Image (spheres, helix red, strand yellow):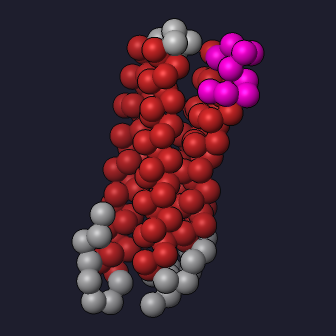
Amino acid sequence: MSQPSHRGFTELNTYKKARELRQFVSKVMRKKLPSSEKYTLLDQIIRSSRSVAANIAEGHGRFYYKENIRFCRIARGSLEETLEHFHVALDEGYITKEDLRKFENDHYQNCRRLIDGYIRYLGNTKPGKGKEV
């Protein structure tokens, strides 16, 4: 029950999109959040956005499909957490509705779709059972 591919995680479209998401979050939030949020909201949103790509990479390095799927689910949870932090930033008046819309439409939705698709792929590739999401 080893990985379905010998490709590195950096070649996965799921990882590439998570990396783009992380870069977008860092760029927007470092500019928009006030210095008083440096060790609170900024730290949280940077950590959660980094966790998306990091968990995809870590899961890819695991030997068993179920472990890879588990890390992809953790990545999906970190993606949801990042979205929540964007909502907090909007509610606090740090970002605009347009910033949130751009994050949701250009990054969050695509990343979520790719993570869910990768989980399905892993579930279908694994001998025996499939369709884990």
Picture layout, residue 23 above or below residue 89: below
Residue 113: x %, y % from top left = 34, 50
Q: Report the magenta residues as a range.
A: 33-41
Residue at 61% across / 56% down in the picture?
54
Between 22 and 16, the one lying in front of the other is 22
Between 96 and 84, the one lying in front of the other is 84
Res 62 quadrant in image: bottom right
Q: Residue 16, can we see it? A: no
Reply yes or no: does residue 133 show up in magenta.
no
Picture layout, residue 37 above or below residue 118: above
Residue 42: x %, y % from top left = 66, 28
Q: Residue 1, can we see it? A: yes
Res 57 quadrant in image: bottom right
Residue 66: x %, y % from top left = 43, 78
Residue at 58% across / 43% down in the picture?
48
Judge from the rendering whether residue 101 lies leftward or rightward of residue 129; answer left or right.
right
Judge from the rendering whether residue 113 lies leftward or rightward of residue 60; answer left or right.
left
Residue at 55% across / 83% down in the picture?
63
Picture layout, residue 23 above or below residue 6: above
Residue at 49% across / 83% down in the picture?
64
Reply yes or no: does residue 34 show up in magenta.
yes
